[in-house]
Structures are given as structure tokens and as C-alpha cells.
Amino acid sequence: MYSSITRALGASIVISGLCVSAAALAHATLEAQEAAVGSSYKAVMRVPHGCAGSATIRVRIRIPEGMVGVKPMPKPGWALETTKGKYEKTYELQHGKISEGVKEISWSGGRLPDDQYDEFVFTGSIASDLKAGATLYFPTVQDCETGAERWVDIPAEGKSAHDLKSPAPGLVLTLGKIR
């Protein structure tokens, strides 16, 4: 009897895990979802599918205030564009002060079939005056040959991204170095 209960419980845990994993894969997400305040950060945005069978042809990511000195990685077969602008304030980096930079990144012209996934990469610095425990959100729009997926919803104060249908990928800020 003990072994049949253990098997049933184990199967239940596996099925629950698969359901959670499938739900997590349905959204654009950051590979590393934590970063230390005042550190550099390599963002790897995962795009898990197209739009209801239609291939992805453009990915746009809005950079939140506090992520500065952003440099996107080119992708073979995709055109890379950035939109630059003024920050809300001046930030101190290792090489000096910075008051403007990349506010949005767009990769376009490629083709990501619905049954494949890809990653879009950029680096930057997390401002040292941000608060540990806060979350930076990276609203992401995935344009497809037909339709779009808009991962842009940011939870209201006291709410969770899990409560949203199309949550923006989030980065939780911590103290100290992330390993």
C-alpha cells in the first residue's frame, strides 16, 4: 500500500510540475530572473513560440529605468535597432556618469517558426541606487506574420505577475552578487 501511495503522489507531483513548466514556457521570460543592485547583468530573453501558429518576425523590448548602459547582441539574420533617450536622472557607472542610453531594443527581419524558440540577448548595469527586493519589468512585444503577443502587463502594487494573462518579464533585484 505504501508504494502505491508513493507512486500516486510522485505522479501527481510530476504532472503538477509539467503543468507549471508548460505555463512558464507560454510567456517571454528572462533566463536569469535575479540580479544584484549595482552589478552588470546579461539579459537573455527567451521567446518560446510564435503567435497561434504564425512565425515571429520582430521582438521589441522596452528597457526599464534603472537598467543603464545597455548594449544589445546582434543576431545573424535579424536587423538590430535601438531607440535611445534621456534617463529620468544621471547614473554613476564605473567609467563615469551617464544620463541617456538605450530605452528600447528591436530585432526584426528574421523568422522564428511557431514550433521553435529563440533567445535575444543584451547587457547593461543595474543602477546602484535601486532597492533590493524591487522588480524591474521588461515589457516585450513579439510581432508575428499574423498577430502579436504582448508581454507587457505589470502587476499593481501588492499583486503578483502570476495573476496576469500577459506578464512582462521581471527581474528581481537583490543585495550582493548572484552566482
Image (cartoon, rainbow, N blue to C red):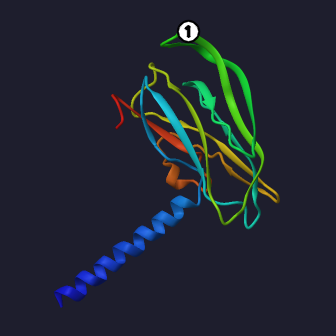
Please give the name of the residue rendered at 50% of the width and 39% of the height, measured from the top-left corner: 157
Helix, strand or loop status at disc 1: strand
User: Residue 152, image x and y in percent?
Assistant: 65, 45
Q: Quadrant of residue 101?
A: top right
Residue to which mark 1 is pinned: 97
In the image, 151 versus 118, the foreground residue is 118
Please give the name of the residue rendered at 67% of the width and 25% of the height, measured from the top-left corner: 102
User: Residue 139, image x and y in percent?
Assistant: 64, 41
Does residue 78 sit above or below 38 in this rendering?
below
Does residue 108 sit above or below 162 in this rendering?
above
User: Residue 75, image x and y in percent?
Assistant: 68, 42
Residue furthest out toward the front: 76
Left or right relative to 13: residue 119: right
Q: Is residue 26 visible?
A: yes
**Which quarter shows the C terminus?**
top left
In the image, 62 versus 166, the foreground residue is 62
Residue furthest out toward the top: 96
Please give the name of the residue rendered at 34% of the width and 72% of the height, measured from the top-left corner: 13
**Which quarter shows the N terminus?**
bottom left
- Count all numbered tags in the image, as a single digit: 1
Amino acid at the residue labelled 1 = Lys
Q: Quadrant of residue 106?
A: top right
* Label 1 packing within 10 angstroms: few (<14), some (14-19), many (20+): few
Does residue 36 sit above or below 79 in this rendering?
above
In the image, 172 versus 81, the foreground residue is 81
Q: Quadrant of residue 17?
A: bottom left
In the image, 177 versus 150, the foreground residue is 177
Does residue 130 sit above or below 171 in this rendering?
above
